Image (cartoon, rainbow, N blue to C red):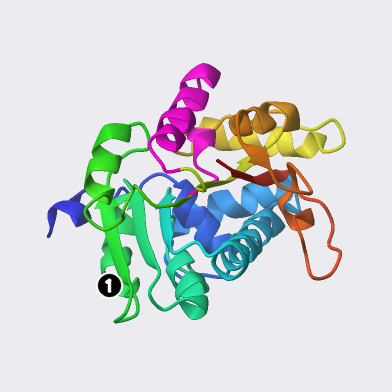
Amino acid sequence: MTDIESRIDTSRPHTARIWNYWTGGKDNYPVDREAGDQIRRLHPGIGDYAKADRLFLGRAVRFLAQQQGIRQFLDIGTGLPSADNTHEVAQRVAPDARVVYVDNDPLVLAHARALLVGTPEGRTDYLDADLRDVDSILTAAAKTLDLSQPVALMLLGVVIFVEDDEESYAIVRRLMDALAPGSYLVLSHTVTHPDMPDVDAAVAFWNEHGTPKLTQRTPAAVERYFDGLELLEPGVVSCSAWRPRTPTPDVAMYAGVGRK
C-alpha cells in the first residue's frame, strides 16, 4: 500500500467522493452514496450543483483560453477527475496550455496521477498541498508555470472549507498578489440564500456527518473575493447563469470571474 492509499478513509463520507457520485462517477464508496442520497432527500436539487459547477468550469476555461489568450492554469481543489477537466478544456483550445492541479485528498491524488495526462505540447502537473499552504503551492507551481506571465487561478468549491472569513479572503489575496497583471480569478462557492432554505439543512447534515466541514457564505460575501479585481459580466451569479449557452435554473453555487 502506498502512502497516498494509506491516507484514504472509507469509513466517513467525503466531499470529493460525494461530488463524484452526484456527477455519475464511480470513484466513491457506499458511505459516500448513502450520505449523498440523504443530502439529496433534504435538498432534491443538490446533485444539479455539481453538474452546474462542472459546466461553469468548462465555460470559464474555454472563455479564458479562447478569448483571453490564457495559457496557464493553477487549479486548486481539483476534485476527482471527470469529463472535461481543466487541462482537457484548455488544451483542446490551446495544446500548449500548462495546468497545475493542487489537492490534498489522497483519492484525488491517486487518480490524478493516473488520469490527468496532458498533450505533448503542453504540461500538466499535480501537487499534494492544502489551500492554506500558499507559499508551498506557489513555489512548486513555479516549476511548471511562469508566474511572470498571466495565470488563471481556479478555486471552484474549495474556499468553502476555510471557515474563518478573513483567513479565506487573505488566502485568495495572497495567491492573486503573486500572479502577474492580466491574471484571472475563477471562483465558485456554496451560498446561503433566503430563496433556498433547504440548502442550509443539507449543509447542516453534511457538517454533522461528513468531512471536511464546509462554510456557506452570502452572495455578497462571495463577491468580496473579487475585491481589487475587474469583475467580468455578469458578475457573481449562480454558476448556471454565468454565460450559459441556454438558460438553466439557478443553483445555490455562485461563481464569478475577475481580472487582475
Residue at 65% over, 59% down: 56
The region drawn magenta spans 153-180
User: Image quadrant for the C terminus?
Assistant: top right
Residue at 81% over, 34% down: 197
Residues 181 and 200: in front is 181
143 left or right of 250 in image:
left
User: Image quadrant for the N terminus?
Assistant: bottom left
Q: Height in image: 37 above or below 139?
A: below
Residues 88 and 204: in front is 88
- Residue corresponding to mark 1: 114
Residue at 41% over, 41% down: 179
Q: How far from the left and from the top, in percent, is residue 130?
A: 33, 38
Can you see residue 120?
Answer: yes
Q: Height in image: 119 above or below 155?
A: below
Residue at 77% over, 64% down: 244
Q: How far from the left and from the top, in percent, is residue 139?
A: 23, 42
Residue 171 located within the stretch drawn in magenta: yes
Q: How far from the left and from the top, in percent, is residue 44?
A: 76, 53
Residue 146 located within the stretch drawn in magenta: no
Looking at numbered disc 1 in the image, what kind of residue is underneath it? Ala
21 left or right of 14 in image:
right
Query: Where is residue 229, by image quadrant?
Result: top right
Can you see residue 133?
Answer: no
Q: How far from the left and from the top, in percent, is residue 16?
A: 46, 52
For label 1, count other residues whose C-alpha is less than 10 Å away and answer few (under 14), some (14-19) or many (20+): few
234 left or right of 36 in image:
right
Q: Secondary structure at mark 1?
A: helix
